[in-house]
Amino acid sequence: MKHYRSSIPKVARERVTATFEASQQKRIAEYILNGKLVGVRHFHETGELKYENPLRNGLLHGIVYRSDIPGKLLSAEPYFKGFPHGTASQWSDEGKLIGTYTMKQGTGIDLVVRVFRKRTPLSVRSPLFQRGETARVRVVAE
């Protein structure tokens, strides 16, 4: 997948925790390094990535990836010690960047951007302003 670079260490040991009933393909896998859980991945029945949640000390830490359609990345959102932190990106089903937003230790606005046919509705999923801080939001639309 374009724009995908895992935050889960390559040397982590994979432990499959759930499979699809019909195909027995892995559905959920945990990743262990030095006895600690460092990530969880969910897969489509095709075997392609659906979600990736990197962990450090039980908290999201690294880039969280989401792919609702096999092989097509929907979003990449950076986390730091359990909080959204950094610039997240969202792509259309065609792989075109449709929006970014920047969070600082969980503060800012997290936008959900979806493209439906020829219109682009925007909705604010969770206003996370704290201590009078603001967020930088960039939406790319045709």
Image (tube, helix red, strand yellow):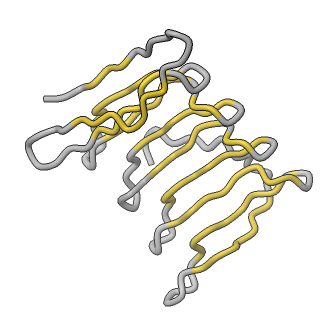
As displayed, is residue 122 above or below residue 66? above
Along the horizontal axis of the image, is 113 left or right of 88? Answer: left
Along the horizontal axis of the image, is 141 left or right of 77? Answer: left
For this rendering, which residue is in front, 85 or 54?
A: 85
The image position of residue 53, as x and y in percent, is: 62, 49
State the residue at coordinates (8%, 43%): 118
Total count of labels: 0
Q: Residue furthest bottom?
A: 22
State the residue at coordinates (52%, 55%): 51
As displayed, is residue 120 above or below residue 43? above
As displayed, is residue 66 above or below residue 50? above
Image quadrant containing the C terminus: top left
In which quadrant of the rendered view does residue 130 lie? Answer: top right
Along the horizontal axis of the image, is 108 left or right of 105? Answer: left
Q: Residue furthest front?
A: 131
As displayed, is residue 88 above or below residue 7? above
Along the horizontal axis of the image, is 99 left or right of 41? Answer: left
Q: Residue furthest left?
A: 118
The image position of residue 128, as x and y in percent, is: 48, 27
For this rendering, which residue is in front, 45 or 105?
A: 105
State the residue at coordinates (62%, 68%): 28
Q: Residue furthest top?
A: 132
State the residue at coordinates (35%, 59%): 69
The image position of residue 84, as x and y in percent, is: 57, 31
For this rendering, which residue is in front, 69 or 115?
A: 115
For this rendering, which residue is in front, 121 or 45?
A: 121
The image position of residue 30, as x and y in percent, is: 72, 62
